[in-house]
Amino acid sequence: MPNSFKLNLVQRPRRLRRTPEIRALVEDTVLLPQNLIAPLFVVEGKGRPEPIASMPGVFRLTIADLVRECRALRKLGVLAVALFPKLGARLKDEEGTAALREDALILRAVRAVKEAVPGMVVMTDIALDPYTTHGHDGVLTADGRDVDNDRTVGILAQMAVLHAAAGVDFVAPSDMMDGRVGAIRRALDAAGRESTSIMAYTAKYASAYYGPFRDAVGSAKAPGTPGLDKRTYQLNPSNRRESLLELRLDEAEGADVVMVKPAGIYLDVIRQLRQATRKPIAAYQVSGEYSQIHAAARLGWLDLAACRRESLVAIKRAGADMILTYFAREMAAELGR
Ligand code: PBG
């Protein structure tokens, strides 16, 4: 039976979806290479890039390769990198003392990037997890059962001053200790580093999606032991209101940029902070978000390029101004084509 059904519609939203050109014209979220920040892992030595099994396409780079990567990113329009060191086990101890060494790998990496690619915005993580044998973001209390807040903050403030002196544009405290943003701001100012910015990990949740990153920097516990538990300092994934409390504190303490992490499964938190602050918002599409797209693509279950783009557009649409993502290079390359 021929179907001659006809609706008498004034509103037909499909009119604006008819052609790619019309769709582009009415698009309200536009992802740009300049919105992306590339997290990069750096190691000592002169070896070849080391693949990270749980993060396909991501490598630990020596300083020479890191500089090459930064040049390539810059050509693609990615203007910022966030650097994470991976230390050999011999350099780690209970107190993370290697974090305050004047010859630390991360400081040499920052100087090398700044010298070779002066315009590149360089950010470094302020936390002790790459430096401690236990993998926590700070030093432990006397009974060894928790991270000591204030003693950790004292160390992080010194660490931030060292990073600032090496030339970073942003220090990014990812440790989630109370009062660290204010202490870092005061220490930077006292050291004459009032131009160094703070990107605060404001709403950083205690997420299982950090697993692959912990492989990358070697902060995961030994195989067979339960995973690292950071629930006494990172936010409870069940809590949304608490992100507003952290926002208020970080703003009052002097954060220049506030962050939500993870990103794609916390879009409600990004949205909420967007409505509550005038500061720029960063969102961190974390290792597990990256790896799960890759894993599904390997199985032939998801289209890698399409999911890469959609996952990032969604994060921007929720309200993020900038996105830390392991897809930065490939995404920027695709956007430039
Ligand atoms: C630790 C830190 C973590 C990440 C960034 N900084 C992991 C953690 O808190 O254990 C995670 C990033 C990712 O998963 O991509 N200071």
Image (cartoon, grey):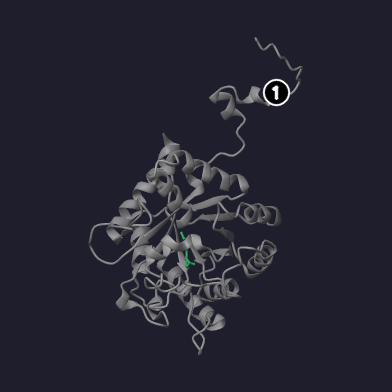
Up-down: is 138 above or below 320? below
Q: Nearer the viewer, residue 314 or 336?
A: 314
Residue 21 image-quadrant placement = top right
**Residue 37 % position (x, y):** 47, 52
The quarter of the picture where residue 108 lies is bottom left
Task: Please name the residue shown 41% across and 77% down the image.
Answer: 132
Residue projecting furthest to the bottom: 142
Amino acid type at circle 1 is Arg
Please tell me whether mark 1 sits on a helix, a strand or a loop: loop
**Residue at the spot 67% in from the left edge and 66% down from the top edge:** 242
Q: Quadrant of the C terminus?
A: top left
Give whichever of 297, 33 is nearer the camera: 297
- Is 174 above or below relative to 271? below
Instruction: Report the residue marked by disc 1.
Output: 12
Mark 1 sits near ligand 1, with its Cβ under 8 Å away: no
Quadrant containing the N terminus in the rendered view: top right
> Which residue corresponds to the image point at 31% horizontal and 59% vertical from the top-left?
61
At label 1, counting other C-alpha atoms closer than 10 Å, the crowd grade (few under 14, some 14-19, many 20 or more) is few
Percent of width and height locating residue 304:
43, 42
| Residue 107 spot, x, y in % from top left | 37, 68
Q: Which of 72 and 196 is in front in this view?
A: 72
User: As drawn, is 290 to the left or to the right of 103?
Assistant: right
Q: Is residue 145 visible?
A: yes
Q: For residue 325, say whether it is visible.
A: no
User: Which of these two is toward me, 273 or 228?
Assistant: 228
Left or right, residue 235 beside residue 7? left
Q: Single out the residue that lies furthest toward the front.
A: 1
